[in-house]
Image (cartoon, rainbow, N blue to C red):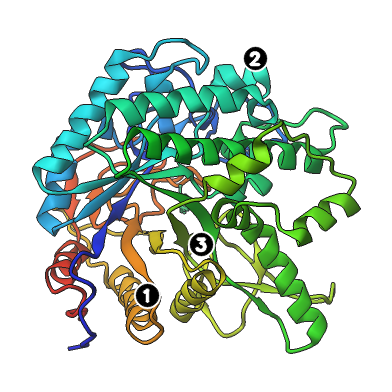
């Protein structure tokens, strides 16, 4: 029996999903086409999400897993009932923009889309589950990409504002916790997914990415402002793909390199949490010849409407080296890093570092002094179910247990303020990075494979009862 001190009584335990990875029903009830629909499984997926290969519609010869996802659109009641059975206090999900505004630039929203999410939030509330809503999780209407070029265009701020006003108004009293952009720093690594950016031949990609990032940062501040105006109870968070960089050696040049790499990611949160562009970023952009067009009032908006809390995903730490000869890479969440010889890795090569979570929590806390929320963490693994669908996923339990232990240490021994923890893919869903179904994170097994075959039946894994016990014991019973 491993004993840890109880987590705070109001700690928000739960799980997380994203619309495009689980809902399916891509053309139902008036939904429009989104960037995330047209990213197929297979070797072209990465060039497409990186904005290097153009795919603006479905093409022959490809399989698009988001079209059907795990059909949660039609099965959310069954799925939420299972989350409730585990004792979830919160459920993180995202809204599909194209259900609310199918093209993105309409004046009026699609009532069917609003009604759908209203029902879903009510279903959560029925069980006392607090919805935690990501407004955009790698999600952009295709029409906005084709007609406006995605987030490179300032007009996107206006369309996003309309979306926010609509949902904040309609879901007032049902939703209190909001995240503006999932993993906002992913715009640097997966710009088509993160910001609907496809690069034309000869275009200055760095310039386009940072201009688009500026628009997202302004939109995020505006969303925070409007959320507070519409309901002072609203809490708005930013969302970072986190994971501290370690220097490969104690050579000062390696430390400096690690610091630069960290800054690449923290830049976004520095703006969202502190309210202005940090000097290191301004200097860096100047060196690279990047000129960001800012509109009148942007600086004030960023300054006055910083986020209430900082949320992040954590799967692994990362390693940086100043020595180009040190280049043994390891896979990671979209972007690769130098391999850390001290760590084990998952079947997908993501390195496993529970202490890195404590380090990340402390670093973010030291940097911002704002409450934090871990909104993604988990192990993507191949599961082998028995004939009933049951999976003995001790590997997943082991991964989560070690991470929960270091979270507990960060709270009790370091004094960080942590609002909650939502494990990624609490029900098996489509992988964002690879499009696979066989990379599973869930407590609930879904009968579906990489080719889209299977009954979609849900079954509890061993980790289902384990997580139920973790929540019921306030994180004290982890064995
Ligand atoms: C994060 C995303 O990047 O990591 C999720 O916010 C994603 O959408 C998760 O699914 C895990 O990555 P993957 O590639 O294993 O699905």
| SS for callout 2 | helix
Q: Which mark is residue 147?
A: 2
Q: CA distance from mark 3 to mark 1?
A: 19 Å
Above or below residue 300? Residue 286 is: below
Which residue is pictured at 56% across the width and 16% down the height?
A: 143
Q: CA distance from mark 2 to mark 1?
A: 44 Å
Which residue is pictured at 47% across the width and 38% down the height?
A: 225
In the rendered structure, are the residues bearing label 3 and label 1 in contact, judged by CB atoms less than 8 Å apart? no
| SS for callout 1 | helix
Q: Is residue 176 left or right of residue 164?
A: left
Give the farthest residue toward the top. Answer: 107
Q: Is residue 260 left or right of residue 170?
A: right
Ligand 1 within 8 Å of the CB at mark 3: yes
Q: Dot 3 corresponds to which residue?
A: 348
Q: Dot 1 corresponds to which residue?
A: 403
Q: Residue 450 in the image: x percent, y percent?
A: 41, 42
Q: Residue 473 in the image: x percent, y percent?
A: 13, 74
Circle 2 packing at 10 Å, graded few (<14), some (14-19), many (20+), is few
Q: Is residue 156 visible?
A: yes
Which residue is pictured at 17% across the width and 49% down the height?
A: 129
Above or below residue 106? Residue 289 is: below
Q: Residue 169 in the image: x percent, y percent?
A: 32, 27
Above or below residue 164? Residue 243 is: below
Observer-side mark, 3 or 2, equals 2
Figure disc tally? 3
């Amino acid at each position: 029996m491993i004993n840890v001190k109880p987590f705070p009584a109001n700690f928000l335990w739960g799980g997380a999903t994203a619309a495009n990875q689980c809902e399916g029903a891509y053309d139902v009830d008036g939904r429009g086409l989104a960037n995330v629909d047209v990213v197929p499984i297979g070797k072209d997926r990465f060039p497409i999400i990186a904005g290097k290969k153009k795919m603006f519609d479905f093409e022959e010869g490809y399989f698009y897993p988001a079209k059907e996802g795990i059909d949660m659109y039609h099965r959310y009641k069954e799925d939420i009932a299972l989350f409730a059975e585990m004792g979830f206090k919160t459920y993180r999900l995202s809204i599909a923009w194209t259900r609310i505004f199918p093209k993105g630039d309409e004046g009026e929203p699609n009532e069917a889309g609003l009604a759908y999410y209203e029902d879903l939030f009510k279903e959560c509330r029925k069980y006392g589950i607090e919805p935690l809503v990501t407004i955009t999780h790698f999600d952009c209407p295709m029409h906005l990409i084709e007609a406006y070029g995605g987030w490179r265009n300032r007009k996107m701020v206006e369309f996003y504002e309309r979306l926010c006003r609509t949902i904040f108004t309609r879901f007032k009293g049902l939703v209190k916790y909001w995240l503006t952009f999932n993993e906002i720093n992913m715009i640097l690594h997966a710009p088509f997914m993160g910001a609907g950016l496809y690069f034309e031949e000869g275009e200055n990609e760095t310039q386009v990415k940072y201009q688009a990032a500026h628009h997202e940062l302004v939109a995020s501040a505006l969303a925070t402002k409007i959320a507070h105006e519409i309901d002072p109870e609203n809490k708005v968070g930013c969302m970072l793909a986190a994971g501290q960089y370690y220097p490969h050696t104690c050579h000062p040049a390696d430390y400096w390199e690690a610091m630069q790499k960290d800054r690449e990611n923290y830049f976004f949160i520095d703006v969202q949490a502190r309210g202005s562009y940090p000097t290191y970023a301004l200097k860096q952009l100047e060196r690279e010849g990047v000129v960001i067009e800012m509109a009148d009032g942007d600086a004030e908006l960023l300054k006055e409407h910083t986020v209430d809390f900082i949320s992040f995903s954590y799967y692994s730490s990362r390693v940086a080296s100043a020595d180009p000869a040190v280049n043994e890479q390891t896979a990671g969440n979209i972007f690769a890093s130098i391999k850390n010889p001290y760590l084990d890795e998952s079947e997908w090569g993501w390195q496993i570092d529970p202490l890195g979570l404590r380090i990340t929590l402390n670093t973010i806390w030291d940097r911002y002094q704002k409450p934090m929320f871990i909104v993604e963490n988990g192990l993507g693994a191949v599961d082998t179910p028995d004939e009933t669908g049951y999976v003995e996923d001790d590997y997943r339990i082991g991964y989560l247990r070690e991470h929960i232990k270091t979270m507990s240490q960060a709270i009790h021994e370091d004094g960080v303020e942590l609002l909650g923890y939502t494990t990624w893919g609490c029900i098996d869903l489509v992988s964002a990075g690879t499009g696979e179904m066989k990379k599973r994170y869930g407590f609930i097994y879904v009968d579906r494979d990489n080719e889209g075959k299977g009954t979609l039946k849900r079954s509890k894994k061993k980790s289902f009862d384990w997580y139920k016990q973790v929540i019921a014991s306030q994180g004290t019973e982890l064995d």
